[in-house]
Amino acid sequence: MNTKKRLYLFIILLTLPLFCVASHENWEKQLDELDNSLGQRKYYEDQKLKRIKQLKKQLVSLPPSKQFDINRKLFKEYSSYQYDSAYNCAHHLIDEAIKLKNRDYEVEARCDLVFCLLSAGLYTEAFNELREIRMEGTTTTARKLYFTMASRLYYDVSDYTRTEPYQSRYVKQAGVYTDSLLHYLPKGSPDWLYAVGMRDMKERRYEACLDTFKEFLEKKGVDVHQKAIVNSCVGWVYLYLKDNDQAMKYLALAAIYDNKGAIRETTALCTLANLLYKEGEIQRATEYVRQSLANANFYGARQRVIEVSGILPIIEQDRFKIIQGQRNAIAVAAIISVLFVIGLLMGWWFIRRQMKKLKKAQQTIANRNKELEAKNHQLEEVNNIKDEYIGRSFYINSEYINKVEKLYRTIDRKIAMRRYEELRSSLKESELVAERKSMFADFDETFLKLFPHFIEKYGKLFDENDQKVLSDGPKQLTTEMRIFALIRLGINDSERIATFLNYSVHTINTYKTRVKNRSRVENDQFEQLIMDI
């Protein structure tokens, strides 16, 4: 008997890794499909814009009394795509419904406005608008929409609150609206299944809600937006049940449907990025969270921007740790080689100095991340700067890794061939100078993208007879202009400016004093005028 038990245990342990690999391949396949879908992002967006254009074209040929249905279709296209357009469209629908004196139209239009507000995180305003809706004299269609929107609002607020006893109260009230909605829905219909599944999920009856949602997904005629929402809900439930493999599968499906529908107000991709980060898929997590931030900024969902902005620095920090680990491995190999070959002493010294610079650069990045967190109230300008510099830093870091890898291979090859003199001659100081010039050129180009009128407005701070050539080209700054460009970005510490520009603190202060004395404004006002550019 004991022998049989041991045999069974051995078989289980032997096959367990196979199940793990199969599970991993399952969600890996979904992620590959998601990557392919994101690669067609422009195609799907063009399809949506084409539908919007066709609807607007139809409006021109219709009298005002016949335009309401087309305007509602137009709203549905905008509703999860672009907040400002959807918001304006909803207000237009309300005005149109009032002119037509149609109670059903007015309820539908006001429910559309509630959807806009809750999607943008404006919950107080959404509640105020919901209270304005009057149901007297309305049909079943209008009542279904009202109860749907009311339950959605209370469920969303319960997710946002996450504090007892308020969360339970919101869930309970949402359940009341859901019960009212179910009276108007045919049992077993997609809308009925969605409402029941959502109620079960919010009331933490997870097994029941999974069965209901999966039955919903088997229904025909369900649009991609509904599929995206339900797949996202299923993924969230599996995440709560700690089944990360299934969670990633369904979240990836949700993100695919979101992309196919050109839906920008979504959480699936960001949640998936967070899961991948925990699984160690840093590169994919970075790409997905950047895409999520772009979606949130495009739609105009403030709460999504804040949520994604909190995840991005964490993923970036781990990404830098991985790069640091790779560079440390290269440095260790070089140091070990130096211990055996005296002729490589200069190479070892060079790498060590580079590592010190790397640590200083990482400290600078850490300090800037703290500054970004402290200035979240300046979100619009910070997001613009961050998007531009993150894109640039990804390219530069990749380029730097390639250069370090190439240097390592050169060192390794010449050690093997005992060409020590050639190795010494290949480690030239001029390459560092060229790298610094390249860094300054990248900085100038990126800065002038963010502040394209900086050179022109900077020149206006000086008298005409004292103005000099302000730059070496249309995308280059002078040294003194770089100093004040860094100040415009919020870097006021002379020591940090000196480190970046490779000057002493005394030289930086001399530049600043000389420029202020030459300007046409008071010295104590000069830096404030720079910040106003």
Image (spheres, rainbow, N blue to C red):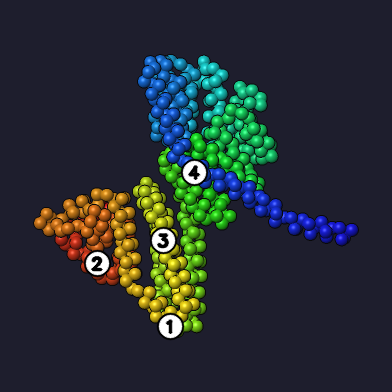
Q: How crowded is mark 3: few (under 14 residues within 10 Å), some or many (20 or more)?
A: few
- Marks 2,1: beta carbons within 8 A: no
Instruction: From the image, tell me which residue sits under label 4.
Output: 38
Numbered disc in front, either 4 or 2 = 4
Q: In this view, does 337 lie above or below 508?
A: below
Q: Is residue 79 above or below residue 517?
A: above
Along the line of sight, the residue nearer the viewer: 520 or 194: 194
Mark 1 or mark 3, which is nearer the start of the sequence?
1
Q: Residue 509 carries which label?
A: 2
User: Could you give the CA–CA distance between mark 2 and mark 1, rounded to whole angstroms?
Assistant: 42 Å
Label 4, secondary structure: give it. Answer: helix
Q: Earlier in the sequence, mark 2 or mark 1?
A: 1
Task: List the single residue furthest toward the left.
Answer: 465
Name the foreground residue: 35 vs 280: 35
Residue 39 vertical position relative to residue 86 in the rendered view, above or below: below
Category of crowding for the residue at label 2, using alpha-carbon neighbours closer than 10 angstroms: few (below 14), some (14–19), many (at least 20): some
Point out the tag, 1 or 4, that comes first from the N-terminus. 4
Under mark 1, the amino acid is: Gly
First-in-chain label (3 vs 4): 4
- Residue 271 percent coordinates (x, y): 54, 46
